[in-house]
Amino acid sequence: MATNPAEVLSLPKPAWAADEVGMLYDMAHRFMSEEIAPRYDEFEKNEMVDRESWRKAGAAGLLCASMPEEYGGSGGTFAHESAIIEAIGHVGVDGFGIGLHNSIVAPYVLHYGSEEQKKKWLPKLATGELIGAIAMTEPGAGSDLQGVKTRAQKDGNQYKINGSKTFITNGQLANFIIVVTKTDPEKGAKGTSLIVVETDEVEGFERGRNLDKIGLKANDTSELFFNDMRVPTSNLLGHEEGQGFVQLMQQLPQERLQIGTGAIAMIERALALTIDYVKERKAFGKAIIDFQNTQFKLAELKTEATIGRVFYNDCVTRHIAGGLDPVTASMAKYWLSDLQGKVVDECLQLHGGYGYMNEYPIARMFRDARVQRIYGGTNEIMKLLIGRSL
């Protein structure tokens, strides 16, 4: 019987994962196993998950789970989003960009949108009619968001936007994009604003190529170009210009915690698959698990994974209660993604030569894990933020 990634660490469920959150995990796991996993090789080849899968996820209640019911969501919390992301990681369909859509893009609308904006956009995000992205990174501005050059100039009741973005997750499919732009370049961070672009309704918007990445092949990641693109001034998030940098800083802890979610889920799957492999694979007349080196290595990895899971569970508990500070979120992002890279690498080693073969899931995990230490703010930036708190 295969080892269950959700049970590989033998830990009791935290209070936040009980009852309906556990039921949602089971439903999400079943959906990913039945609807996404059988086609995942196709999605990797096409370098995107098709729109129909997004709509099916919406119909199954897996989009905007933490948005209020009055706006088409399920009325949950980040615990519900965690359940969905963990199911994605445990099944091994990490390139399905639901996490960004659910717990990064939609919350900006919920927290900073007007009542009219929330009623207009959130229900469509919940059904998958709209697929969300957030355009932060530029060719010359990554972790340093104050360096953004994209410019939005007010012209009557419209903004004229010029600039370009790169490395945008969901970039080929997204038709709802929150653009980080300067409305007043003279004010630096205080001149930054967030403006929503509904790509089906504007001129001057252009998608670049679907970028050729090392891993997460099933997730479309794109360049975006704005050439005198005009959007209504009513698409500004917030009651006035210049609030964008504060809005970004307020939401980044959840984004960084979400990266930790994907990390711990993949760690658990890597361990489960590797334990099964070393029990079946034989060398020198005995199973790989019977070698002391294998036992010691897996003992180390399980111990570190258990520490990671306990830390992650505590972060979610604090976040749901409104007490997850940016420094602790930075710790979770950096440490869990570092651990993810270590565990996956060690598990690949225990697979021997087969670990280097693409037909084995550990090979895909090895590729997919690497970006976790880069996006959401590099781990070096996380350490800088932690260091400033000392």
Image (cartoon, helix red, strand yellow):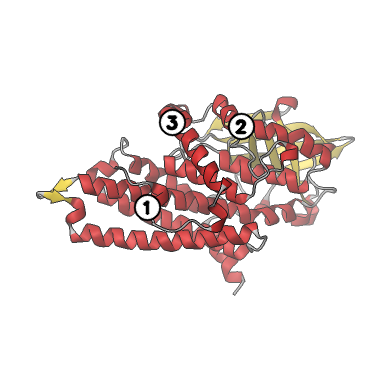
Q: Is residue 375 visible?
A: yes
Name which quarter of the figure residue 355 lies in: top left
Query: For residue 144, which quarter of the picture?
Result: bottom right
Q: Are marks 2 and 3 in contact (CB under 8 Å)?
A: no
Q: Quadrant of the N terminus?
A: top left
Residue marked by disc 3? 40
Residue 90 sits in which quadrant? top left
Locate residue 182 relative to residue 6 in the image: left or right.
right
Q: Label 2's element? A: helix
Q: Position of residue 22 (x, y in %)?
A: 52, 47
From the viewer's perspective, is the residue at label 2 or at label 3 nearer? 2
Q: Amino acid at mark 3?
A: Tyr
Find disc 2 in the rendering and name its residue.
58
Mark 3 Cα within 10 Å, few/some/many (few <14, many 20+)?
many
Residue 270, position as x, y percentages in the image? 36, 48
Q: Residues within 10 Å of mark 2 (few under 14, many from 20)?
A: many
User: Position of 225 compared to 232: left or right?
Assistant: left
Among the two numbered marks 1 and 3 on one chain, the one whose residue lies closer to the N terminus: 1
Front-lying residue, 10 or 282: 10
- The amino acid type of the residue labelled 2 equals Gly
N-term-proximal mark, 2 vs 3? 3
The number of numbered badges drawn on the structure is 3
